[in-house]
Amino acid sequence: MIPHFAHPFRFEDGRAVVVDQNSDDDVWTCVGTIVRYLKGDRLAVPDFGIPDPTFTEGRIDTEKIRVAVEKWEDRAGVVITEAPDRFDELVRHVLIELKGAPADG
């Protein structure tokens, strides 16, 4: 397997953390990277990432997040659900799950 640096980049036991190319961890790392960036954050690729949900009122548009993830990571099929916080009605939670494992290739 070909190692890729995990994102966010970090060290454990004095070594950089890596994931194997095309593993579930690799796909999940890529999905996590996509949803951590807002469109416009990366100057070289301004369309990369998800729309900024910061001042969204009501429900989060999970379809826009799904479209962004599947555009930038074609190995990932995702199921995205959104729900209010139990204690704070102004807080929304978004859960992203991978559908199946990526194909080896």
Image: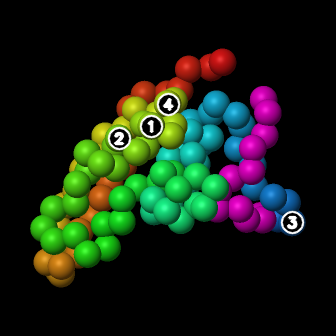
Callout 4 crowding tier (Cα within 10 Å): few <14, some 14–19, many ≥20:
few
Query: Which residue is disc 1 drawn over?
Result: 71
> Which picture quadrant has residue 23?
top right
Q: Name the front one of labels 3 and 2.
A: 2
* Quarter location, residue 63: top left
Residue 84 at x, y percent in the picture = 17, 67
Marks 1 and 4, how far apart in space?
6 Å
Image coordinates for residue 82, horizontal then vertical, percent: 22, 56
Identified by mark 1, the residue type is Lys
Tell me which residue sits at (45%, 59%) in the image. Answer: 39
Label 1 secondary element? helix
Q: Nearer the viewer, mark 1 or mark 4?
A: 1
Label 3 and label 2: CA atoms lie apart by 37 Å
Q: Earlier in the sequence, mark 3 or mark 1?
A: 3
Give the residues in magenta: 1-12
For the residues labelled 2 and 1, the Cα–Cα distance comes to 6 Å
On the rendered image, what quadrant is the N terminus found in? Answer: top right
3D distance between C-alphas at marks 3 and 4: 33 Å
Q: Residue at x 22, y 60 (%)?
A: 60
Dot 3 corresponds to which residue? 14
Cα separation between marks 3 and 1: 35 Å
Return the disc, 3 or 4, that comes first in the chain's sequence: 3
Check disc 4 and report the residue beneath it.
74
The answer to whether marks 2 and 1 mark residues whose Cβ atoms lie closer than 8 Å is yes
Instruction: Identify residue type, mark 3.
Output: Gly
100 sits left or right of 17 in the view: left
- The amino acid beneath tag 2 is Val
Residue ID for mark 2: 67
